[in-house]
Image (tube, rainbow, N blue to C red):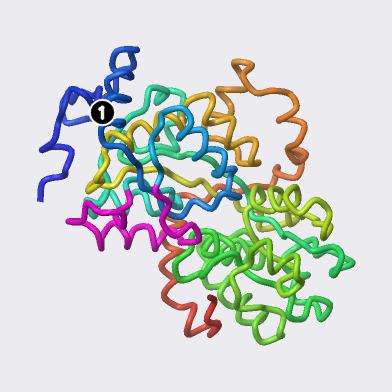
Amino acid sequence: MKPAWKSTLQLTTAIIFTTGTLTNFASADAMSELVAAAKKEGSLTTIALPHDWCNYGEMIQSFKDKYGLEVNELNPDAGSGDEIEAIKANKGNTGPQAPDVIDVGLSFGPSSKKDGLIQPYKVATWDSIPDSAKDAEGYWYGDYYGVLAFEVNSDIVKESPQDWADLLKPDYAASVALAGDPRASNQAIQAVYAAGLSVAGGDAAKAGEAGLKFFADLNKAGNFVPVIGKAAPLAQGSTPIIIRWDYNALSDRDTLKGNPKVDVVIPKTGVVAGVYVQAISAFAPHPNAAKLWMEHLYSDEGQLVWLKGYCHPIRFNDLVKNGKVPQDLLDKLPPAAAYEAAVFPTLDEQGASKEVITKQWDAVVGANVQ
């Protein structure tokens, strides 16, 4: 099947093709035409965007306010794997269950491109996105990153764990949860990988299997709670320790406003940084709205909305260099020293660990996370 973008080239999309590669040209006229085309479509369908994740609530509202489009939000709590399955399941569907855009873990970008599930588009700020965080042809591009941290209900847990090995202590019985199902959620997969990286002394080749063994031990010890950790169960005390991206934990700390008090700990070892990526479905019912959404996300305005949610936007260095980040936002970020040990797994490392973790979780750990 021909990719959808090859058969629907229109001037209103403000794009041209040269030597098989998609090129976006930025101009006021082109942007106006894109806005008009998106408004004609009338709406955008997103998936897996919780409002408290990276400040997506404000991001979605600012997009609606700026362009007057409706946003149909599918399954906010879905994992990256669920997003891909939603595209596959709705290839011929132009109704409200077909996502236009996805926000997935880095490893899902290349695999989605290979499977013909996404289409290329380069935003106006394309050149300021690091080459290492984008597909050269524009099929996917990094949007933000963070590191995995321990989010702790300090009203219940009096002494917060400082490293992965601490989670095995009897003090944390029936306390530790993942923020997703490691058979489908990128965040959970990376958490297992991070634990394994710590146990394996930084050996990426062994991190997948070591992470599975760690969680098997955690489960046998009675410390692991097979429930998807969120702010509500954290506050209620049913999952007083959640392993999740630092930006989610810091956002919860603000939202809960001290009830309960939340401690956010970046572990001493196994500090794994994760980059998420954006892409447009190859079968998007609203392709122009999808492109306009991308322009919004990667504009200076959109990037700062993510930063307000404690997510480091992919254009962060460019924004800082050009003096576009307000000092009050910089002051709210954790100390830089806490991130010095951060490791950015390569695509190959992520792919290998994902293969091991998703396929062997049931057999090795045997905990049905839901």
Residue 35, by quadrant, is top left
Specify the segment rendered in magenta. Answer: 72-99
Q: Residue at x 53, y 73 (%)?
A: 209
Q: Residue at x 35, y 42 (%)?
A: 44
Q: Residue at x 75, y 27 (%)?
A: 328
Q: Is residue 84 magenta?
A: yes
Work out whether 347 lies above or below 65. below
Q: Is residue 140 magenta?
A: no
Which of these two is toward me, 240 or 46? Answer: 46
> Label 1, on which residue?
37
Where is residue 330? Give x, y as percent: 72, 30
Q: Is residue 224 left or right of residue 370?
A: right
Secondary structure at badge 1 equals helix
Residue 268, by quadrant, is bottom right
Count of numbered marks: 1
Q: Residue at x 73, y 38 (%)?
A: 333
Which of these two is toward me, 163 or 40? Answer: 40
Where is residue 237? Give x, y as percent: 76, 72
Q: Is residue 80 left or right of residue 38?
A: right
Where is residue 93? Give x, y as percent: 21, 56
How dense is the environment of label 1, judged by Cα within 10 Å: few (below 14), some, or many (20 and up)? many
Which of these two is toward me, 348 or 201? Answer: 348
